[in-house]
Image (spheres, coloured by chain):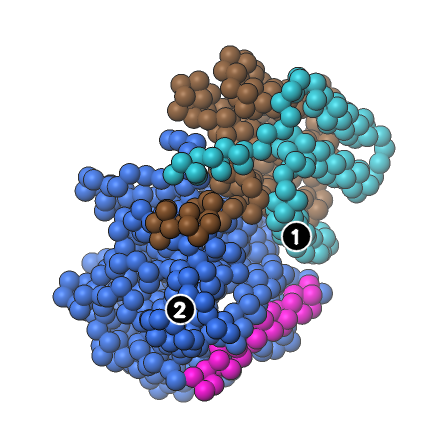
Amino acid sequence: MAEKIVTDKASVTAPSTSGNVIAKYLPVYFALLAIAGLEIFLAYRNFSILTLMVILLVLAICGAALAVMYFMHLAQERPSLFLSLIPATIFVLFMMNAIWTDSFRLLHMKPFAH
Amino acid sequence: MQEASPAQVHAPPTSFLRKHVFSLDHKVIGLQYYGLALAAVTLGMVLSWLMRFHLVWPTVAVPGLSLISKVGAPGGIITPEYYLSLLTMHGTLMVFFVLTNAPFAAFGNFFLPIQIGAEDMAFPRFNMMSFWTTLAAFLVLITAFFIPDGPPISGWTAYAPLSAIGSDAGPGLGWGQTLWAISIALFCAGSLLGALNFISTTLDLRAKGMTLMRMPICTWAWFITSCIALLAFAVLLPACLLLILDRTAGTSFFIPSGLVVSDRLQPHAGGSPLLWQHLFWFFGHPEVYIAILPSMGIVSHVLMASMRKPLLSAKVIIYSMLSIGFLSWMVWGHHMFVSGMNPFSSLVFSFPTLTITIPATIMTLIWLGSLYGANIRMTSASLFSLGFISMFVSGGVSGFFLAQPSIDIYLHATYFVVGHFHMVMGVASIFGVFAGTYFWFGKMTGRMLNETLGKVHFWITFIGTYCIFMPFHYLGLVGNIRRYSTFVDDFMGPLMPLHKFITIAALITGAGQLIFLFNLFHSRFWGKPAPQNPWDGTSLEWSIPSPPPWNNFGDVHPVVYHDSYQYGVKGSKGDYVMQDSPEQVVGG
Amino acid sequence: MSESQVAVHGHGAMMEASPYAIPSRKLTMWLFIISDAVTFGACLMAYGYLRTASTDWPTPFKFYPSILNVIIMTFVLITSSLTMLGAVDAAKLGDKAKTTRFMWSTIFLGALFAGLHLREWLGLIGEGVRPFHNPWGSPLFGATFFSITGLHLLHVVSGVIALFVIWRGYTRGTLTAGHVETTGLYWHFVDLVWMFVVPMVYLLSIQR
């Protein structure tokens, strides 16, 4: 049992704890705020809804990537963890996109909307 | 709680409640899941009897049935609506509480930690929660029988808008359907907890030397299954929540505008019934593999101990299961070829559906090829394993037809489909459970099951299943539609003799299961005491007493030296070498 | 095989090393997070599906009060992620006072977020938005809005409760820095979901 204690303690990933951690993550923090600000700014430009959606989605994915890699420390873990989690999630979410063909069609088949 | 160990190691249970009811022990939880599945399968089987009985003798009263539902079965005669209720409950019980619980949760809980050499699951408390959540889901579902309205009539797939608009649409669609949705949402939560636990246990708690590729095939099957379950139930959960909102909060996610039901314009607008089908089947097809993969693993495991030689390639079996897990996310649309889905999507879904037969075929060929020249020990467990392969092939072949939209349009919603999925997913998976039960009962309870009764049980079940489900394919081809409660007065009349044959076969096969139940209960108390390793198996569960002590390996930490299938080699114990034996294997 | 035998055979640890070299608890939280990500993904896709299939989807959010409120909420939530990072770091160093400060800042910011969210909800309800009806168009607007933001709000509230429980356990010594770190992962994930909810639910429905 004693050995388990050692292995487990050692395996708690410890990002560098010297200095102020807040200062270390401030660039990511400001980047996330900047992305949020940019999204709101772009939302008031005159893009078509489809263009706007694509732009916002790309920005949101960038923000999410920053949060996952730095706030959630995935960048500091072994690459195997990233490779196990992220491609699987993206793959499943990607497959779900097959539903769109039907929602576009429904628009033209709808008899009761106006 | 301590940081100390990765497993939240718990003390030996002392009170009765901790030992048998709110147990943290993965073995007790496994047995609890098994008991729950047994209760569900018994109930589900009785429901199927009632349906078969009503189909061929629609005017004969079933004694006592009117006590359960005065409205549904006045004077013991099932109404068409109550027939649909029975059908819904049969499907829901069987798919969720039997096919998901028995091969995956029950055997997985009991044997996964033992097979990797762990003391318990990574999170025993989560494990207990996952069982009790599942039990709550079961009880909520069963409650639907006892409310005045009766159980829902929308089938186990709960297709919207029928399932979404409420009691206007028919009996059972008031509270019955709401209870159904709550039950399935709870079931999702329980399964997600279980899946989390299985994955982290497999990855983190392996004994020294138990590399991933040395794990038994069934451990792999449970691991892959839990990976699928982790992401599949995550989609059904919000789908059920949206359905509950549609039913209780007046939203219209799945209800289109201008729907008139029972002469009443429904107060909903703008939703899409197809969305429910997409969300449901996005979960539903992976669910099919959640049901069948564990049985594939169990069968491979049992077969090798019976054949006394390893499979041609255990690695290829594992890779095939992985690729099935991967492809299972691309094929759900083949359930929706006639649903009004974009015909272009049908084409897109048909291709991976046909592709997924490749890994399945590779696995079948490996099982069959390995049997060649094997001096097989004919135990009940090996009989059921062979029966699994037979069912899987017979039921799987009809899948080639259904995978093609042009043929499926004709065969959809007929008995052909019913025969197909009962054989390939239902009965095949159950055969895996039977094989596991005959194989592991001694380890689980300390008593051996009676082999003679087991073999009688096998032959009745095997022949009976073919008598029931093979004719289904024929019925479907001639156009017999599923979910109709009676055929006597229409053009299906000439098919009645065949229906009668099927019903009699179903009643006999069902009665044959009583042999199994008798065997279970009799052997549990009066069976032959089980030795530690009755089948000369090599994996870790055979290196500990039957039944195992509360912490599985005592104070010993097993060390693993071989992969799990050192059969047909020269070892000190005979023709096999245990995984935890340090002997050198020549040519192994 | 007893421990002494293991030593003879030269095996240091009792178990195979975890493939990711992280504690089980953290791995399980990661698994929960990807599962939950798929749940939110399904919800957002269902919303997109319904919106695409509708001709009369309303775009009612005015800069004041809605978008301004969202800007404040986003700022609050991202800042709470930063304080959470501080809490995790302090907990690892064993600095209980600092951990307490950071965790309570996070709890405060989380509760503030929930409060602002409720204000937003009440404002919309005041304008006549219900899950089954709204004054502007497709009734699904309210249904999707309340269910998606409601699910997120549920995550925030459970996160706040979890933070409190973990803080109490940590300061009393029953829970460890590992627990704080795991809760931190969850908290960042809640933040991450909000990064998708804001553009998809709010910014695509701005009143022009």
- The span shown in magenta is B345-374
**Chain identity for the colour brown used in the image:** C
**Chain identity for the colour cyan used in the image:** A
Label 2 and label 1 in one chain: no
Residue B423: image quadrant is: bottom left
Q: Residues within 10 Å of mark 2 (few under 14, many from 20)?
A: many
Residue underneath mark 1: A91
Q: In this orientation, which residue lies closer to the viewer: B172 or B533? A: B533
**Chain identity for the colour blue used in the image:** B
Seen as rendered, the residue at the extreme left is B526
Seen as rendered, the residue at the extreme right is A46
> Could you tell whether B412 is left or right of C136 in the image?
left
Residue underneath mark 2: B577
Q: In this orientation, which residue lies closer to the viewer: B373 or B491? A: B373
Label 1 secondary element: helix
- SS majority, magenta: helix
Label 2 secondary element: loop
